[in-house]
Amino acid sequence: MNWNIEELGYQPEKATGLGNKFLIGNGYMGIRGTLEESKKDQFPAVNLSGIYDQVGNGWREPLNAPNGLFTRLLIEGKEYCLSEKEHKAHTMELDYRHGIFRRETVFEAAKGTVTLKTERFASMVDKHLIALKVTLVPSYDGEIEVITGIDGEVWDINGPHYDSVLTGVTGELIGAVATTHEKQDKVAVYEALEIPSVAGQEAAIAEQSTKEKDRTVLRHLKLQVTAEKSYTFFKYISIYTSLDTAAFQEEGKQLVLEAKKRGYEALLKEHKNNWEKKWSRSEVEIEGDDEAMEALNYSLYHLHSIAPRHSKSLSIAARGLSGQTYKGAVFWDTEMFMLDFFLFTEPEVAKTLLKYRIDTLKGAKAKAGDYGFCGAFYAWESQEGGYDACSDYNVTDVFTGRPMRTYFKDKQIHISTAVVYGIMRYIEFTGDKELLSEGGAETIIECAKFYYSLLIKRVKDEKYELYDVIGPDEYHERVNNNAYTNRMVKFTFEAAIKLLEEETENKAEAAEKTLLLESFRDAALHLYIPQPDEKTGIIEQFDGYEQLEDVSVEAVKGRLLHEKEYWGGAYGVASHTKVIKQADVVTMMNLFSSEYDMEILYKNWAYYEPRTEHGSSLSACMYSMVACKCNMPDQAYPFFLKSAKADLGDGGKQWAGLIYIGGTHPAASGGAYMTAVEGFAGLKLENGELKAEPRLPKGWKHLKFKVQYLGELYQVTVTKDKAEVEKIRD
């Protein structure tokens, strides 16, 4: 298998997308795959997890740290940047088995060429450390100057987020300490430089700039070079914030000094060994389809790169650590699309993701209270403390330039069901009920209270309904009885009932819990769940959906007056049609497939797929998984590949109205994994035992992976007509 991706040549229009495609990270930070000489107009970023800032009325978003990777060549008074200077050759490479980014560029200068080679990684051993190797090979004798240091002119979408960036020099270190606008949090970046002794090489710091207005601190290294000889230096960069430790500056300085003492090769070896341990549990082997195997494992690379292993309570943003898109907020994506990968391969990370939700329960209860409801209404776009970063005006009208009122924050009530689903799934696969006593049980019951306070009953009707919601299909806002939402709310009531029935009660709590039990049982029994139509077998997505205009996706697309026009909302081109953004009913049927026979599954799959724009990267995997459950693996395959290649291609939706939404797609990565493991391999629990059911697409000879279940590790091997699930003995 090939664990490397390459980009040959340079096309400026692709630079933004390549920043996502060639991302490296370690869960604490994500480093976009831009070049070392890039300045903020080319979207370089060292994106940090769990720390946010807001400026004025702009959207609150995560921080990009001052860029300690900044490096440019200065030859005969001219700075060399790939986007601005002539070059003879250029290659970018990502080793996604080990999270190593490399580039090689041949610049043309007046006297000859200079080859610039770099290699960098975000350490998987120490989450605060970046290491960079720089090599120059000139074709001529003469002088080359290298400008390298920390660039505090940071790319922001809704910034600038740093009121000040103070730079300085301390002995052999240079540093920059940035102060945020909103809370005066600090981000400290330090750099130590190692210049090995090389015969014929002279390197000296000629100048250092520490002017605050420049927000940069730079070393100028003058090298007297000889033709065809290599000149190498190393940079060790630390990043700490004041949220990490009170001694963030001292620890940052100490880390880079220790890294320099240990040396680049030793750090790289440890980093690669750490990656190998992760792949020993998570690599997926597909015999007969290298394209699929490479795309799938590339997807898993991205999930590994953004896993918050440095924390006991932190989640993953919808765009991972690829930048500030979607405000660095946590959506339902994490529980419904990413969780299974970690649950099956690294359960401790899955617990960290769920602890984030438990620890932000206070924020969820406050949000519910703000709307006049009981219980816990989780943030649609969750930042620290459960703060909902979702704006009431989340899309910009491309014609007027004015913000458009949207209702994602108010009406996507299904977010709390995702939290409950994640907690229950974790308990089911790990058997670790400590999560319940650590706040998980309270979270589930508070979510059930929220939904109970939303129920509507007509005077002469026994059924409960849920009005004025938005389902996964965001193109249709404020609908009644969305099938997915109602069924997931019933799941929430059932989970709360199970917990209340199992709890040992003291007398003081007995009356309250008895009342809750009666209420939740009544709600679960009488909540309206849309059923398949007797004639067609189709489950109506929401009340009145069947009365909408039935028109093709292409026809709706043809009605656009602007390529970035938003399809949904009150006046969107899709809002009065049956065209939907992403899997909605099909998502519900995937989660509760045992409740429907195969004919009903197929009819709904065949009905909704042609009417789905797939305007979200979350969509394809759901259609793929339901196709597998209809014994249609070959029809599932293109959707699987679309998910697995979400970050490998050059396309992808980059805009919602005038809002930039580019970045990586970790939910699609998780969806590709779920499709392979739970779709093609048919992995499932049956009477508390792991089972697999082969549904391999054409050309696949076998599918092989490991799964952790109830603390034991299993090897799953699936061929066309056979599935083996074997416990791995220590």
Image (cartoon, rainbow, N blue to C red):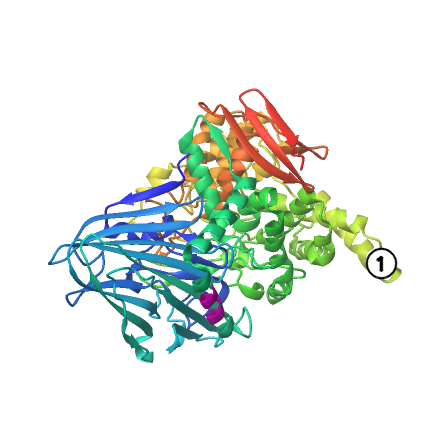
Q: Is residue 609 above or below residue 322?
A: above
For the C terminus, which image quadrant? top right
Q: In this view, does 403 lie above or below 716?
A: below
Q: Give the range drawn in magenta.
A: 252-258
**Is residue 77 rendered to the left or right of residue 658?**
left
Q: Which residue does the image show at 34% across and 79% down from the upper left?
A: 212
What amino acid is at disc 1? Ala
In the rendered image, residue 254 lying in the magenta stretch gets the answer: yes
Considering depth in this image, is 611 or 590 the residue closer to the camera? 590
Residue beneath disc 1: 511
Locate residue 152, reporting x and y percent: 35, 70
Locate residue 154, reporting x and y percent: 35, 67
In the rendered image, residue 423 lying in the magenta stretch gets the answer: no
Considering depth in this image, is 332 or 212 the residue closer to the camera? 212
Q: In this view, does 260 lie above or below 679?
A: below
Considering depth in this image, is 80 or 445 the residue closer to the camera? 80
Q: Majority secondary structure of the magenta segment? A: helix
Q: Which residue does the image show at 42% across and 34% down from the upper left?
A: 1
